Amino acid sequence: MDLSEVIDAYLVESDELLREMESILLRTESSLPNDEDLNAIFRAVHTIKGTAGMFGYETTVSFTHVVENLLDELRSHLIPFQPILTELLLKAKDHLSFLVSEETKGKIKNEKITFGQSILDEMKPFLQSSSGAPETNRENKENQIGNQEESNTNELKKSGTNPGVGKKITETTSYLISFRPNQNVFSQGLDPISFIGYLKKIGNILSLKTIDQFLPDPIEFDPENCYLGFEINFRSKENLETVQNVFNFIEADCFLHIYPPGFSVEDLVDLSNQLPEEEIYLGNVWKEIQILDDNLFLTYLEEIKSRKTGIPSPSSLVSQTNQKEESESIAKNQNADQIKDSHKSSTIKVDSKRIDNLINRVGELVVSCANMNQLIGDSDDSNLQESSLIVMRLLNEVREISLKLRMVPIGESFQKYSRIVRDLGKELKKDIRLITEGDETELDRNIVEKLSDPLTHLVRNACDHGLELPEERKKNGKDHQGTVKLTAYHEAGNVIIEVSDDGNGISKEKVWNKGIEKGIVFGEMPDSDEEVYKLLFHPGFSTASQITNVSGRGVGLDVVYKNIESLRGSISIKSIPNQGSRFILRLPLTLAIIEGFLVAVGKSHFIIPMEMVLECLHFSDDHKTDSNQFFALRGNLIPFLRLRDYYPCDVDSEQPRENIVIVRNGDKKAGIVVEKLLGEYQTVIKPMGSVFRHVKGVSGSSILGDGNVALIIDVPSLFERTITVENQKFYSHRG
């Protein structure tokens, strides 16, 4: 049986639960967690343990069992919460994350199990007693509960009250679980018995009745189908949510109804109307598993009869007033819940590969539609042209919707850096605070995944070499606590992510002198900060006076630069001495489809990202201010370049008419001189082949409607190449 999809769901769910657990622990580190926090952590560990048990992942189950015991005693206030437990539970979370991932692959090694045992050994002193303590405590509590039940029953008898009259059957800790797995449940890789077996870990099954009314004749019996149902009388000290969590993984493949302690005869009648079995049969089942006694069974039959005949039963008349008051209260709560639910949006989980496949198909459709529009544009059929415009409009809407499917909030990625900053602060003996802004900013999921390593490098560098030690900060008149800030926001069709710190900043002189020492540059330091800071991205460049285990300002930044460049993004640095530094990452919203501006030089076509295009103007040599490559734009001088000077193009023999496209990169403007302006063009990005992958100034290619290839211009990289060429000319001229 193929369980790959089910196991994938287990991995995704476990990852979400563990991230929630880590988030709570980090959030409450400076203050003690409240009951709600402890319950949430307990539920996360408990759910993972239950699902792992269904798959037979015993290493995960045995590890989570002890962690669960500790959390159970904490939330029950049997032991006090101590700050050292935060560190211990974070270690447990990390190891549990490893177990979940590796045990599904069958790659658990003995040394890793030993490491997990060392974590459990650290937990044992905090438990109330030995590893058997939780079970003993549970038994004691259940005995107390049983005594309380008997006391309650005696009180009812003394008062002359009939337990069958009124709303509640009795104040019992027993749950009634009606469990009807779907016939095809086995084909989903699920075994209903394993869920029932897991109930024993959180309580006692007092009695169970197997419902076999719908077993087919032997000839029609299919061993791959499930024909059985179950009625269970279950006792537990756990709350309803915990009991329901046992069935989380099978909930979508069964009918499940769990009545908590205090359910009424009327509730059982309502339940009987939802189940496929007859009411009388179900009443006898509930009597057999000791949910109903003889008196309550008669009350149950009266209630069924009264509903069929429309004549109220005696028990209904007795409790009518109380029920009216309760129903009014419930109605108010339901109205409030409905108002609250109306603001919620339902979500479904979809394999990311399916979304990628959808976007690829939409991309191909865009190309085909562009080709169709080009052919239709040459015809004189106005109806056909109108239809093509409608199709194009609808296609644009589908494109926008499909791209949004892959957009995720960057805040989910920011969360993990809280743990990194916390651990680095302890290792470096620095008090560091992480601030995140713009968590709701959405970005393509593929970009978010590839941003993990670059952001980790930048955050580690900011903590290690950006921020000073607390003593040094106090001498400089700063707060002893350093700040690292992660900010995300939209700007001109791009997403900007900033990693900043309030440390000692970057010394331009030190960077330039190090560049001279390594033979990368020579001469006097330029006025442009950008030119100096670019040295930090040179492979192997570092200004650190000593090597640390964490990072060095510049070490690893060449990897950051290459990764950001591969995402069609750019990175820049701003720094003020003794005030801090900012690393600014500018990234596209998506990697799949681009809104571009199509231009041509001779027979060659190029696409400039639309979000960078400001305006287009006629160009001639008269517009040049001097022999240098500068263009006068409304009193301002901006640099420009001709595409034909950088890419081999088949230029017409006669002097063509030229145009200049004014583009923006960050807060800077520049011009690109071309021959033809062909207008806006929506295109699918095709990656360059391995031979051309490292060509500067080109980020990809696209197939036009007529079958021709157009290169997508990487504006930041193109101008960087231009500056490098001009600098080489300048220095060679001086030499």
Image (cartoon, helix red, strand yellow):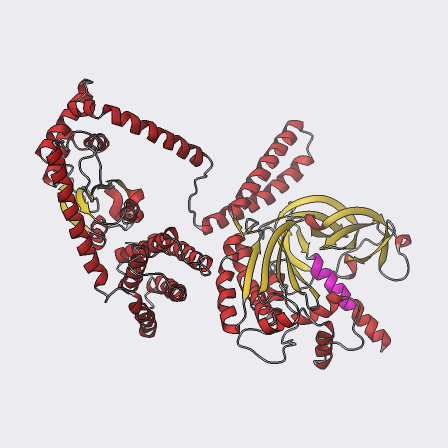
> Above or below — where is 725 with respect to 166?
below
Viewer can see residue 180: yes
Q: Nearer the viewer, residue 381 or 19?
A: 19
Residue depicted at 69% across the width and 48% down the height = 610
Q: From which residue to which does the magenta span run?
A: 715-725
* Label tally: 0
Viewer can see residue 555: no
Residue 638 location in percent, x, y? 82, 56
Residue 473 location in percent, x, y? 62, 70
Q: In terms of secondary structure, what is the magenta stretch mainly?
A: helix
Residue 36 location in percent, x, y? 38, 50
Q: Is residue 720 magenta?
A: yes
In the rendered view, does 434 fall on the left or right side of 652? left
Q: Is residue 495 magenta?
A: no
In the rendered view, does 566 fall on the left or right side of 94? right
Where's the C terminus, which quadrant? bottom right
> Above or below — where is 610 with respect to 532?
above
Q: Nearer the viewer, residue 266 or 620?
A: 266
